[in-house]
Amino acid sequence: MDVLINLSYLLASAMFIIALKRLQSPRTARSGNALGAAGMLLGIIVTLLHRDVVRYEWILLGVVLGSLIGAVMALRVRMTAMPQMVALLNGFGGAASALVAAAEMERLALHHGIAAAPTVLVGTILSSVVIGAVTFTGSVIAFGKLQELISGRPLVLPFHHGWNALQAAAIGVLSVLIVLQQQTWSESLLLQLFGAVIAISALLGVFLVLPIGGADMPVVISFLNSLSGLAAASTGFVLHNYLLIIAGTLVGASGFILTNIMCVAMNRSLLNVLFGAFGAEVTSGTATDRVVRSTTAEDAAVILGYARSVVIVPGYGMAVAQAQHAVKKLATLLQQRGVDVKFAIHPVAGRMPGHMNVLLAEADVPYDLLYEMERINPEFEHTDVALVVGANDVVNPAARKDPTSPLYGMPILDVDRARTVIVLKRSMNPGFAGVENELFYQPNTYMLFGDARQSLESITEALKGV
Amino acid sequence: MTELLFALFIFTLAAFVGFEVITKVPPTLHTPLMSGSNAISGITIIGSLLITGRVESPLLTVLGVAAVTCAMINVVGGFLVTDRMLRMFRPQQREGQDGRAH
């Protein structure tokens, strides 16, 4: 039976790898996801046949409860709320790993005593609960911020870095003590210290994510995604289960790659994002007396209607205003007039990697109209109109031109090179980084103030009469 | 100790496979990649099942049921929401392609 179980785990590992491989194209991605689910089902079923599994009623309770909650969440969540959803899922993954590792520690105490356990095992259990607990509370805070239960602004306590360092040091010291004194200290003391490690790790997760602001969320969610995978992998080390190691490591690698892509797209390092508290000081900006040209929906409709090429640049503002369907209607109408319409997607537009792509897919925009930054940037100088929908920092030309700007060096979408720029924006408030946007003062830029969805609907309405 | 070394081999090789496979995922699928890979990290369900299926102590049963619940939320929620997203991705319709009604 053990051989059968392990062969099934091997098969499940292969299924996970093929599942991820099929995510390389939108055409095969859906079947890939189904294959991943099948691999998971296989893993679950053969585990139930394991000789250690002798009763099923509590398992049934957990499975039914978890499946119900998961299904309700997955089927009801709005596409604009996907970042919160993923944050929460990361958290549950971390929690599950921490719980399993904590239970293994309790089992050691229960059976042969912690003193008799191999040091390596105790060490891996410790790393597993630490990663799992940090992932859990960090993700809960990220969820709270994205759901706006907690302020999206960076929350920085006095001596914040000091507290972080203290907690990290405490986790390290306690863990080393537990491993070193495993054979000498009493079991109850060891378990108390173990509990303290869990508690401090949970606190550290909170402290790590609290100071991170909304626009840095793509990095943090990717990072937590990576951690949730590593938590599963380290649980695999605890249980000597290679399926857990392989699956967890694949997820860890995936999250790591996404974290890296997001950091490059913001021209910042992971350490800078985690410890920089970017945008904490809101510089109100030097009171500029420069003029912006504001326009009306009717004028915008004329400009768009007589353009040959339009590039639409969506940002987080589109998600906030739930404007993806209104964007799609406008794009379709423009296409019917013979206008060449494309979408330009910045890697960190929105609150998580690929956020804009999912929203536009929901609104039924074909994915081949969506262009990545590298592909669309050379085209802006031949573009008649760039229509910016709720994006700010990712189109700020200061990133290219002004070495004193905090955004300097960040790769941006070069919308300022288009012949005309129309910016849909709620107000003149500076973006997340608190940086003035030169783009708005350019002679070829027209600002259309108001809720993005209403503005788009008005433009579409006006365009019908052009 | 040899067991740990063997596990480290597996870990390292899996990391290389992960990097190879995932760098080729296009940015347009990055959100489904996150939610889908997240569902895969719910693989800790296996450890949770083993703990809950044994009869050892009430505390372990509680920890086990909590772990099974968390892991199943991760698994079911992750795969379902990924499927919901991936259903929406479609290319531009060209002639000769059996386009669904829109």
Image (spheres, coloured by chain):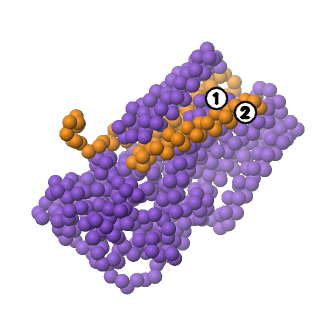
Image mark count: 2
Q: Colour of chain B?
A: orange
Q: Residue A388, percent across and down?
A: 32, 64
Q: Amino acid at mark 1?
A: Asn
Which residue carries the number 2 mark? B4
Answer yes or no: is residue A56 visible.
no
Residue at the top extreme of this rendering: A1
Label 1 resides on the chain identified as A
Q: Residue A266, percent across and down?
A: 50, 61
Q: Residue at 64% across / 45% down in the picture?
A: A131
Label 2 resides on the chain identified as B
Q: Amino acid at mark 2?
A: Leu
Q: Nearer the viewer, mark 2 or mark 1?
A: 2
Q: Residue B5, percent across and down?
A: 72, 33
Mark 1: few/some/many CA within 10 Å (<14, 14-19, 20+): some
Which residue carries the number 1 mark? A241
Secondary structure under the numbered disc 2 in the rendered image? helix
Q: In 3D space, how far apart are the residues under numbered discs 2 and 1 (Cα atoms)? A: 11 Å
Q: Residue at 35% across / 74% down in the picture?
A: A440
Q: Residue A427, percent across and down?
A: 35, 71
User: Above or below — where is B86 with respect to A207?
Assistant: above
Q: Nearer the viewer, residue B102 or B96?
A: B96
Answer yes or no: is residue A127 visible.
yes
Q: Using the rendered image, report if marks 2 and 1 lie on a common chain.
A: no
Q: Quadrant of residue A339?
A: bottom left
Mark 2: few/some/many CA within 10 Å (<14, 14-19, 20+): some
Mark 2 in CB contact with mark 1 (< 8 angstroms):
no
Q: Colour of chain A?
A: purple
Q: Nearer the viewer, residue A278 or A347?
A: A347
User: Above or below — where is A372 with respect to A104?
Assistant: below
Q: Residue at 30% across / 42% down in the picture?
A: B90
Q: Nearer the viewer, residue A191 or A225?
A: A225
